[in-house]
Image (cartoon, rainbow, N blue to C red):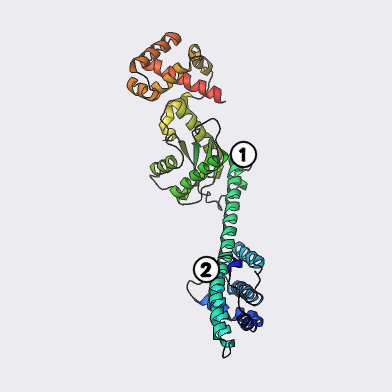
Amino acid sequence: MAADALPVLSDAARALAARCESKAGELGRRITDAALSGPPASADLTPEAKDPRIEAAARHGLRWLIRRAVRGDRGDTRLLRERAAQHADDGLPLHLLLRGQLHGTHALWRSLRAAARPGEEDALIELAGFLLAAQEYLVGAVSETYVDERAALAAEERERDRSLVRALLDGSLPADRFPAARLGLADGALVLALRLPPGDGPVRAPLAVRRELRRVQAALDRTYGTDVPAVLDTGGGHAVVPGHAVPHGTDDDLLARLRHACSPEIRVAAVPAADPGGIAGAARTASEILRVARAGGLAPGLHRLDDVLLEYHLAHRDGSGERIAALLDPITGRPDLVETLRTYLGSRQERRSTARQLGLHPNTVDNRLARITELTGLDLATPHGTALALAALLLRDAAAAG
C-alpha cells in the first residue's frame, strides 16, 4: 500500500490522535522490553546494543504514524528507511526490527484507547482502521529497505571475494597476504576451470550473458552449499571451492546443475590445491586440462587430470614438438580433415561414432581418413600412427593457444 492511499481522518479522529502525539518517546521506551522478550530472542547482540536501536526504531515509527494521523499529510519515510538501512548494516535482525514496529503500533492503539473520551467511539474505530492500513505500509517500507540493503551488502562482499580470488589467480596478490581463513580456503580448495560454449548467433545480448553467468554461479553455490568465489565471463573462467565444501561424489551433481544452467556442451576441469599457495598453479593446470580434453576430442563434461593424463603429457612441448606438430601441415588448409581426425581420435577410432557425431556417412569418414593418411603419411590403423597423430594435434593446438 502506498502512503497516499491511507485514509484521511476526520477532525475528531485527528484531535484524538493529537492528544497522544507527545507520548511517542515514552511509548518507544515502554515497548523495548516487550520486543526483546518474545521468541526468538537475539543471542548475538549485547543488551547494550539492543535497547537503543529497537527503541529508536519504534519511536521513529510511532512518530510517523501520529504525524500522518494528525496532519493528514503523506509523511516522510526517508528517516525510517535510513534507519532500516543502518540497522541492516549493523546486523540487527529484521525480526527484531519489525517486532519493535508492530509492538509500537499496538502500544499506540492502547494509548489512543486510554485517551478516548465518551462520545469518541467512532473516532477510535476510525483510528483502528487507519493503524491497520498504516502498519501495512510502515512494515513494508522498513522491510523493503532492510532487504535491499542486505542484498547490496551481500553483493559487495561477494565482489570483494571475487576480486581477492582474481588477484590470487593472476599472481597480483601473494598467497601469504591472501585472507584464506575468511574465505574458508586455509585448508585447501578445489579449483575449477569452466569453458562455456558460445551461444546462438554472432553476438549475445549482455542481459542474456549476465543471466547465464548468474545461473552458473547459482549452480556452483547450490552444489557445494556455500558461496563459491568465481571469476567468470562469456567464455568461462575459474571458481575456487573451499576444501571443506567438497564431499565425495559431487562431480555428477555439479555437471548436471551446470548443464541445466548453461548448456550440455559445457566443459569443466577440477584440480585440487592443498593450500592457498597452490591455487594459482591448480588454475593453470585446470585450464590446460580443458584445452587438452577438447583438442583430444573428448566429449564435453567434467574432466580431471587422470582422464587426460597421456594427452596432457604429449601436449607439452620439448625439442621434438615442432617436428611432430609439422606432421599435420599437409592438412592445415582442410578443416574438414582436421575435425574428422580430432573426432575420430576422441571416439576411440570408432568410425560409426565419428560419422554420427559429424553427421556423415561412415564411408565418407573412411574416405577422409584415407586422405589424411595419404597426405600426412600417418597410418591411423596402427598404434604408432595414432599416437603420432594425437600428439601432433595436441601440439598444434597448444601452439595456436600459446
Q: Quadrant of the C terminus?
A: top right
Instruction: Name the residue tied to disc 1.
Output: 171
Q: Which residue is at the front of the view, 229 or 367? A: 367
**The image quarter in which residue 319 lies:** top right
Q: Residue furthest front?
A: 10
Task: List x then y, in percent, for residue 285.
Answer: 51, 34
What's under tag 1, amino acid-wise?
A: Gly
- N-term mark: 2 or 1: 2
Q: Residue visible at 56% across and 60% down?
A: 147
Mark 2 lies on residue: 95
Percent across and percent down for residue 142 are 58, 66
Q: Amino acid at mark 2?
A: His
Q: Who is closer to the viewer here, 393 or 281?
A: 393
| Dot 2 crowding, Cα within 10 Å, few <14, some 14–19, many 20+ | some
Residue 356, image quadrant: top left
Alpha-carbon distance for marks 2 and 1?
A: 43 Å
Q: Is residue 161 visible?
A: yes
Asked which secondary structure carries label 2, the reply is: helix
On the image, the x and y values in percent for residue 87 come to 61, 65
349 left or right of 169 in image: left
Left or right of 101? Residue 75 is right
Residue 37 lies, with reference to residue 203, above or below; the image says below
Q: Is residue 144 above or below residue 402?
A: below
Decide which of 249, 207 is in the foreground and name it: 207
- When the figure is inspected, residue 15 is found, relative to residue 183, above or below; the finding is below
Mark 1 is surrounded, within 10 Å at the Cα level, by few (under 14), some (14 to 19) or many (20 or more) other residues, namely few
Q: Specify whether residue 348 is in view.
A: no
